Amino acid sequence: MPQPDQLNAFIAAAETGSFSAAARRLKKAQSAISNAVINLEIEAGVELFDRSKRSPVLTEEGHTLLKSAYAIIESHADFIAKAMAMNAGEESHLCIAIEQNVSALPVVELLVEFEQIFPYIELELLDPGTSDVATLLRNGRADLGLMMEQEHYPKGFMFRGIGHSRKLPVCSKNHPLAKLKQVSHSDLRSYRQLVPRSLDLEDTSHEEQILSPKVWYAESPFVIAELLSAGLGWASLHESVVKEQLAQGSLIALKRIYQQNASLQGIDVVWTKHKPLGKGGQWLLERCFKLNLR
Amino acid sequence: MPQPDQLNAFIAAAETGSFSAAARRLKKAQSAISNAVINLEIEAGVELFDRSKRSPVLTEEGHTLLKSAYAIIESHADFIAKAMAMNAGEESHLCIAIEQNVSALPVVELLVEFEQIFPYIELELLDPGTSDVATLLRNGRADLGLMMEQEHYPKGFMFRGIGHSRKLPVCSKNHPLAKLKQVSHSDLRSYRQLVPRSLDLEDTSHEEQILSPKVWYAESPFVIAELLSAGLGWASLHESVVKEQLAQGSLIALKRIYQQNASLQGIDVVWTKHKPLGKGGQWLLERCFKLNLR
DNA sequence: TTAAATCTATCTGTTTTTAAGATAGATTCT
DNA sequence: AGAATCTATCTTAAAAACAGATAGATTTAA
């Protein structure tokens, strides 16, 4: 197995075209370079330099193996750079959970920038359904979360509002409700309601939004939007989820009597005191504060 | 700079979950593994294993750096594999010159197979114009050539026929010659002839095919085909070059009186005694023998 | 609960490897 | 021809790697 020092000697000799010059560059004795190259040649069984002239010149095999030598040194540099980043306080892995109802676009733009600044951090993205973000943070699966605001968070949780999302009652353009100019409470009660519900059975936050006695549940708001598009029932969904369908007209926003049509819900960025964020997480957090989602 | 032995110890320890087991696998003393890992940790400044339990378990940073360690070892393996291939008689670089008139498709299929068998050989493809293949072989730029047969090759050249190519007089469908059912020698003399001519001024092989007093030259037969398509003159070109244009009707093959319409020309694979072929070149050569180009 | 087994870290002494210094022979340049 | 510069090699000193032994800790089994 070729030693890094041998490879560096090989590279320096190839680049300078002289063992002596390579020794000067690497601040070693000329004999060290000569030995390193010769040992590398013996171990590889390949003549790397043609020594018929005064200065050694790369053979064809040497040219090819030089590229491989660069590849090895670069992978070494990658290892060291990763380790340095960790020493500087960067986490090696960062997991962000973004609730599906949150509009992804502004976050994606943030992540593009993140990749430039923290190229050595592995990023993991989760997009759980309603209110499972908190669960992922609690059990340490995620480091940072974006979710719809909750009344109260578990102990040790930190949060901060970073915008708002509109929640709209919607149905298919072919649904009976779509024919009405305005819908009342009792209109809604007459038809099947689709409700996003968390995987977590403990979580009862969905209950307060149930109006109709005929309820179906789904974990993903996108699945609900699909069902709605097929003409099945109505649901109260976040604007970002049904934005496209509203624009192309396959889904319709219902106008409600006596009540504001859209209820505004806050979006929080959430993290925990329990596991402190590294440099990458802190950067992301501060950039989230400057976001203004809507 | 991390030593390969340290990385191997790190990897073995991570895979077996135990320094002792890693020592057994690598046939070293347990203290050697322990030292290697600890030194790697010190040099990187990163704690790779959590030692709070009896057996060490990878930290998050360890997981990330383990991937980089694999990358380094793999690039080492690539270096060694390349060197081994060279020791087994494979050339590190193989340059093949294929005259533009030769149909590329069967050769391409051969090269796909070549890539599987000789993954460590760098391949270079040249597609010179008429009769420059010999020049590239002579001055050592190319190792192997495919070209239209010549009367006599320079000294030290080896060659073997591997097929034939049809040469056809062609012109645009809009050219006056295209209206004639058969064309005579004097018909052809009346219009501009486009002739492929080598870059090499010494080469006079193009002269014998000149019929018309109005001649233009071009190095590439493809450029000539373009000119023909624009309605400019006629030319005698290889079928493989104008195959598509003949099929789609933009170029027309002329029928000649008194003479066979298509003159058949042999295709040779050519190499030189001067620089002997390696395993890859030999393989390619033998596979060329089995080709039957037409 | 106790004893055996297995693990890691560390110390010690030996062996191996690495590198510098010096030198001789070869090539290039003037 | 002579000066300068290059490489290979020999010798010797320094450094690193390694095995063996051991102590302390944890796990497993009785």
Image: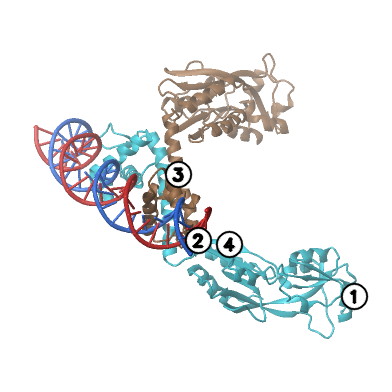
Chain colours: A cyan, B brown, C blue, D red
Q: CA distance from mark 4 to mark 3?
A: 34 Å
Query: Are discs 4 and 2 both within one chain?
Result: no
Residue B225, given in percent of the width and then of the height, sits at 62, 32
Q: Amino acid at mark 1?
A: Ser
Q: CA distance from mark 1 to mark 2?
A: 53 Å
Q: Amino acid at mark 3?
A: Arg
Q: Nearer the viewer, mark 1 or mark 2?
A: 2
Query: Are discs 2 and 3 both within one chain?
Result: yes
Of all chains, the one bearing label 1 is A
- The residue singled out by tag 2 in the image is B60
Q: Amino acid at mark 2?
A: Glu
Q: Please report the residue visible at 69 percent of the width from the left and 23 percent of the height from the top.
A: B254
- The residue singled out by tag 1 in the image is A190
Label total for image: 4
| Residue B45 location, quadrant | bottom left
Mark earlier in primary sequence (1, 4): 4
Of all chains, the one bearing label 2 is B
- Vertical placement of A187 versus B37: above or below? below
Q: Which mark is residue A124?
A: 4
Mark earlier in primary sequence (2, 3): 3
Q: Secondary structure at mark 4?
A: strand
Q: Nearer the viewer, mark 4 or mark 2?
A: 2
Quadrant (top left, top right, bottom left, bottom right) of the N terminus of chain A: top left
Q: Please report the residue visible at 61 percent of the width from the left and 28 percent of the height from the top.
A: B106
- Position of A245 with respect to A47 (left or right) is right
- The residue singled out by tag 3 in the image is B25
Front residue of this view, candidates A116 and A91: A91
Mark 1: few/some/many CA within 10 Å (<14, 14-19, 20+): some
Q: CA distance from mark 1 to mark 3?
A: 70 Å
Residue A18 seen in this snapshot:
no
Of all chains, the one bearing label 3 is B
Residue B79, given in percent of the width and then of the height, sits at 43, 40
